[in-house]
């Protein structure tokens, strides 16, 4: 059992131990919107039970901030409650393949909770957008914005203007359980992430509560600091490639703001995404 905590007017966040993932609920006259749906159908059913202690209101929509399973694998449970599933078009398109990959990986896991992955029904969002979308809750409007690629190709943030809350998904990470390192995974875009955060920051004020995908809510200063560190990662990759350091040597050659072992995908992806004019031989 996990409690939802109000971080703004009718904006509640529950922080779940499994993956330290956040699920957010926004209430309005027309009903409730759930942002991110937890890591399996079983986890989503537990989330729904926690939500029902908070409100009996109709769940009218469930938003995925990006494709990853810990934010999407509860979709079918919310859809069965009548929620319309909403995501960026890139996230929705990538979900079937991502789901298949995760299910295959589950066979190698020993934690019994991973058995839930094979039992989870896939539900792909049917309402998608490319740049921006609004959800009308009657007395308030939620703004869904794709600020650009970063953690994945299909990241979105949710702005609750009247509550001054920004739900940032995994574009922002606070979690000590996850070492507070942004998720530079195999599908990240490290060279674009800083400018995506720049756009997200334009949606904040000095008093905005920012809810990361994992960990405790933070303020705008935290996001500025993390953006600066992500920017150092991008510029270090650009500098190393520009000096002809081979990609296989870049991790050891660079002076990084995060542990090297967390940046292997970032370096590889960064080298792949740089234009040829920003690379110097030898690069192999």
Image: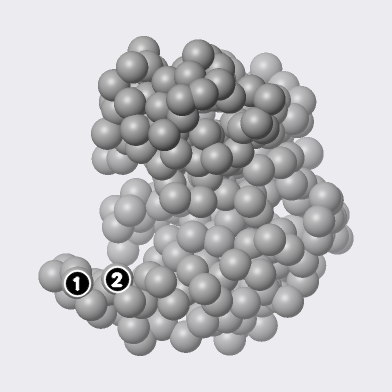
Q: Which mark is residue 105?
A: 2
Is 203 placed left or right of 170 in the picture?
A: right
Measuring from the top left, give residue 146's x and y in whole percent. Answer: 74, 47
**Contact flag, marks 2 and 1 (Cβ < 8 Å):** yes
Above-or-below relation of 4 to 208: below
* Residue at disc 2, secondary structure: helix
Residue 211 seen anywhere in this rendered image of the structure = no
Q: Residue at x 70, y 67 (%)?
A: 86
Across and down, in percent, residue 158 comes to: 69, 47
Of helix, strand and loop, which one carries label 1? loop
Mark 1: give few (<14), some (14-19) or many (20+) Cα within 10 Å: few
Instruction: Name the spot of residue 133 as percent of width and height, x first.
Output: 83, 55
Residue located farthest toward the front when viewing the structure as drawn: 282
Q: How is the image coloured?
A: one colour
Q: Which mark is residue 97?
A: none
Which of the two residues, 119 or 255, is positioned nearer the viewer here? 255
Count of picture labels: 2
Left or right: residue 254 versus residue 111 is right
Residue 195, image quadrant = top right
Residue holding disc 1 = 108
Instruction: Tell me which residue sits at (46%, 25%) in the image.
Output: 282
CA–CA distance between discs 2 and 1? 6 Å
263 is higher (above) or lower (below) than 138: above
Could you tell me which residue is drawn at 31 percent across and 63 percent down?
A: 1
Q: Is residue 79 visible?
A: yes
**Quick check: 16 left or right of 210?**
left
- The residue drawn where x is 55% and y is 54% is 24
């Amino acid at each position: 059992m996990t409690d939802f905590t109000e971080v703004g007017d009718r904006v509640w966040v529950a922080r779940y131990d499994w993956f330290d993932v956040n699920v957010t609920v926004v209430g309005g006259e027309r009903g409730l919107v759930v942002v991110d749906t937890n890591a399996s159908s079983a986890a989503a059913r537990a989330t729904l039970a926690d939500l029902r202690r908070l409100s009996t209101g109709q769940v009218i929509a469930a938003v995925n901030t990006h494709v990853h399973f810990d934010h999407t694998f509860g979709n079918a449970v919310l859809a069965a409650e009548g929620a319309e599933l909403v995501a960026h078009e890139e996230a929705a398109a990538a979900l079937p393949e991502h789901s298949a990959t995760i299910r295959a990986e589950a066979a190698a896991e020993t934690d019994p909770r991973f058995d839930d992955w094979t039992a989870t029904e896939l539900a792909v969002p049917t309402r998608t957008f490319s740049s921006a979308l609004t959800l009308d809750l009657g007395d308030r409007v939620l703004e869904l914005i794709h600020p650009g690629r970063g953690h994945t190709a299909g990241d979105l943030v949710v702005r609750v203007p009247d509550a001054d809350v920004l739900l940032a998904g995994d574009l922002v990470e606070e979690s000590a359980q996850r070492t507070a390192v942004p998720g530079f995974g195999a599908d990240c875009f490290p060279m674009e992430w800083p400018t995506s955060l720049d756009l997200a920051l334009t949606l904040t004020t000095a008093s905005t509560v920012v809810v990361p995908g994992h960990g405790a809510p933070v303020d705008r200063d935290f996001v500025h600091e993390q953006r600066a560190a992500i920017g150092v990662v991008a510029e270090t990759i650009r500098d190393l490639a520009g000096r002809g350091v081979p990609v296989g040597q870049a991790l050891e050659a660079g002076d990084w703001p995060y542990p090297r072992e967390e940046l292997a995908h970032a370096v590889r992806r960064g080298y792949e995404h740089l234009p040829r004019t920003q690379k110097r031989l030898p690069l192999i």
